């Protein structure tokens, strides 16, 4: 589920270096470590509302690949029905003071993109993305999965529409949360509530929460990198993600063998993408 803040942010400069391909029935952006370094695991990113083609998400995938030596897969879970990137600029103009004569037109543009997106990506059609993707991987590609979870650990940046404490209490795998203290979806008090719940879980599901100062919703993916503080905090969130997966990589004994991802005997990871 998205929110008004999900439509706000900056488009990052850069040139993604991975490849777009068809993978297990979905379009996907796939990237690996540079320099021919050995891949030690797989991270799957569930993108934000701007989808798998959003340059910010692709650059983020490249960073994960290089920082952690992971193969990173960014699938099109929305089947081509993502929000267009021009919405960032339209929302910026809509909420800015002044220019009142143009605001009706801007509002129409926002609704033209937003309403179809919400219908096509409602919970009943898009919610089981992680389970559905890996079940499809296993069934269509003959992947060998010994008994064990499909997802070993997860990371999420500034999630929206989280039921607290209900959704957090239901977590059964280790989840790392990167949260901003200015996020209007999860307040600092709620962040501490999440921390208390995930840190009290058994070791197999114990999580963590890191709260970033002066950071709003979307800072880890759509933050304005022209601000040195925002750029620094976004980089720290990347490091948090990689450190979390590196920590749990050492504990995993479930091997995924899948010729279609061109990397046998690799470990399965999942990154619950920033919202």
Image (tube, grey):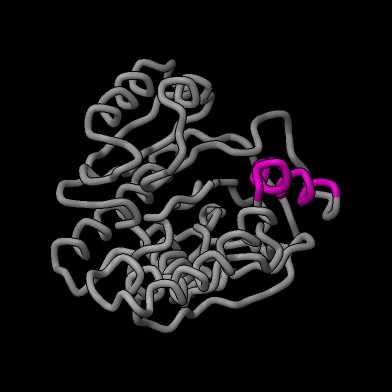
Q: How many callouts does the rendering have?
A: 0
Q: Is residue 229 magenta?
A: no
Could you tell me residue 74's position as x and y percent? 57, 62
Q: Report whether 252 appears left or right of 175.
A: right
Q: Is residue 256 left or right of residue 163?
A: right
Question: Going 41% across and 74% down the picture, which residue do you hit?
Answer: 90
Residue 123 found in image quarter: top right
Q: Where is residue 21 drawn, in percent x and y?
A: 69, 74
Q: Is residue 131 magenta?
A: yes
Tell me which residue sits at (31%, 65%) in the image. 95
Left or right: where does residue 181 sit relative to residue 112?
left
Above or below, comparing residue 22 to residue 25 in the picture: below
Residue appearing at x 35%, y 79% in the figure: 101
Name the residue nearer the viewer: 118 or 101: 101
On screen, residue 76 versus residue 221, left or right, reads: right
Determine the residue positioned at 76% across, 51% down: 137
Where's residue 274, x and y in %? 43, 52
Question: What x and y, as percent, mark residue 62?
Answer: 44, 69
Q: Is residue 151 above or below residue 37?
A: above
Query: What's drawn in magenta, residue-wise?
Result: 122-139
Whether 41 is drawn above or below 81: the answer is above
94 or 37, which is in the foreground?
94
Tell me, yes or no, if residue 151 can be seen here: yes
Q: Nearer the viewer, residue 91 or 34?
A: 91
Residue farthest along the front direction in this orientation:
101
Residue 183, image quadrant: top left
The overriding secondary structure of the stretch rendered in magenta is helix
> From this viewpoint, is residue 55 visible?
no
């Amino acid at each position: 589920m998205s929110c008004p803040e999900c439509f706000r942010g900056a488009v990052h400069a850069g040139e993604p270096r991975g490849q777009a391909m068809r993978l297990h029935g979905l379009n996907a952006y796939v990237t690996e470590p540079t320099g021919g370094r050995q891949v030690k695991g797989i991270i799957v990113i569930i993108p934000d509302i701007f989808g798998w083609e959003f340059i910010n998400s692709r650059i983020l995938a490249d960073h994960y690949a290089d920082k952690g030596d992971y193969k990173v897969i960014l699938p099109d879970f929305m089947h081509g029905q993502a929000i267009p990137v021009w919405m960032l600029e339209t929302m910026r103009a809509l909420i800015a003071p002044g220019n009142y004569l143009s605001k009706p037109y801007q509002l129409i543009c926002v609704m033209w993109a937003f309403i179809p997106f919400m219908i096509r990506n409602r919970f009943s059609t898009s919610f089981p993305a992680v389970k559905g993707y890996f079940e499809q991987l296993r069934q269509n590609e003959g992947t060998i999965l010994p008994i064990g979870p499909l997802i070993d650990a997860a990371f999420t940046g500034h999630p929206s529409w989280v039921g607290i404490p209900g959704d957090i209490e239901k977590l059964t795998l280790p989840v790392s949360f990167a949260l901003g203290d200015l996020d209007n979806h999860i307040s600092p008090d709620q962040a501490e509530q999440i921390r208390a719940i995930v840190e009290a879980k058994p070791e197999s599901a114990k999580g963590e929460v890191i709260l970033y100062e002066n950071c709003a919703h979307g800072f880890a993916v759509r933050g304005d990198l022209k601000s040195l503080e925002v750029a620094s905090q976004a980089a720290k969130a990347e490091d948090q993600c990689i450190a979390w997966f590196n920590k749990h990589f050492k504990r995993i004994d479930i091997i995924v063998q899948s010729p279609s991802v061109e990397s046998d005997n690799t470990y399965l990871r999942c990154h619950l993408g920033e919202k």
